[in-house]
Amino acid sequence: MSDRIEVAGIRAHGYHGVFDHEKREGQTFLADVTYTLDTRAAARGDALAASVSYAEVAALVHARLAGPSVDLLETLAEAIARDVLGAGPLSSVRVRVHKPEAPIDVDFADVCVTIERTPLTVVPENPREVVLGLGGNLGDVPTAIERALALLGERLGALQVAPLYRSTPVLAPGQADQPDYVNTVAIARSDLAADEVLALAQAVENRLGRERHERWGARVIDVDVIDVEGLTSSAAHLTIPHPRAAERSFVVRPYLDLRPDGAIAGTPLADLAVTARGEAHRLAEGEGQ
């Protein structure tokens, strides 16, 4: 559904800007917010609890406008979008921030920044844990994984990497046999939006020659987004946690090596390791070359 609730003209005195006098004296800021959700349950029951209160949203926006100083309207708009998306199960939010008293040396009516965000596209307030699964079964897979990790590290920084595991392929009914896979799991702390993590993973796959001819086909490298801290998504292009990760030994076992107390969708990895499908065993150093 794309039902919309809009709160327009939220006004506050704030201290945002790059100049000292802006941070010292402040000025007027305004924001318009439109958020989308399915309102049918609220309408049927005439119950506020089934919706997202516009009064609560207005208070969140006002607090940001009047709150801690930032330099850029872009930063302020992103923070507002993040706050509003955190207010309930929203599909998206559109934020328009106005700075009508901006320090500009010509006549003007307003300065605005407008952004649209979803839970998958909003930038997190702080770096959060991102779990990636890597693997392949064509060519020198350990070297491909090493190259993929290096490319990921250029944007994600330091990565924790589990040992390599060999696993039998998961095939669709009637699909031709394939070579065994070599897999691992890597964990980073990232300030990227979830969609940006997915785009990075796909860019690395493309850089290393990944071709997509069939679902679950043989591949030189695969980089999957397994989980993103604090986020769930049922979007078709990016389901979080990964919809099949909890069932796959080649994900669960290396992930368990890195996070003995970890979980996927609330189920401990130690429990999943017992029930996960497929054979996966840790490779000895140099094995799999």
Image (cartoon, rainbow, N blue to C red):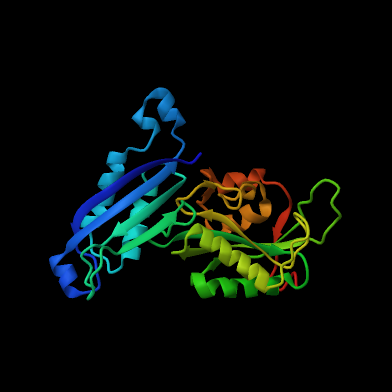
Task: Note whether residue 101 is visible.
Answer: yes
Residue shown at 36%/31% (left/top)? 49
Residue shown at 28%/59% (left/top)? 98
Along the line of sight, the residue nearer the viewer: 39 or 128: 39
The location of residue 171, given as percent across then percent down, is 79, 51
Please state the total of marks drawn on the protein image. 0
- Can you tell which quarter of the image residue 215 is in? bottom right
Along the line of sight, the residue nearer the viewer: 169 or 75: 75
Q: Please, is residue 145 above or below residue 194 in the view? A: below
Residue shown at 50%/69% (left/top)? 156
The location of residue 85, given as percent across then percent down, is 39, 48
Residue shown at 75%/73% (left/top)? 140
The location of residue 40, given as percent across then percent down, is 46, 30
Indicate left or right for 27 with 212 as reference. left
Indicate left or right for 200 with 288 as reference. left
Task: Note whether residue 125 is visible.
Answer: no
- Can you tell which quarter of the image residue 150 is in? bottom right
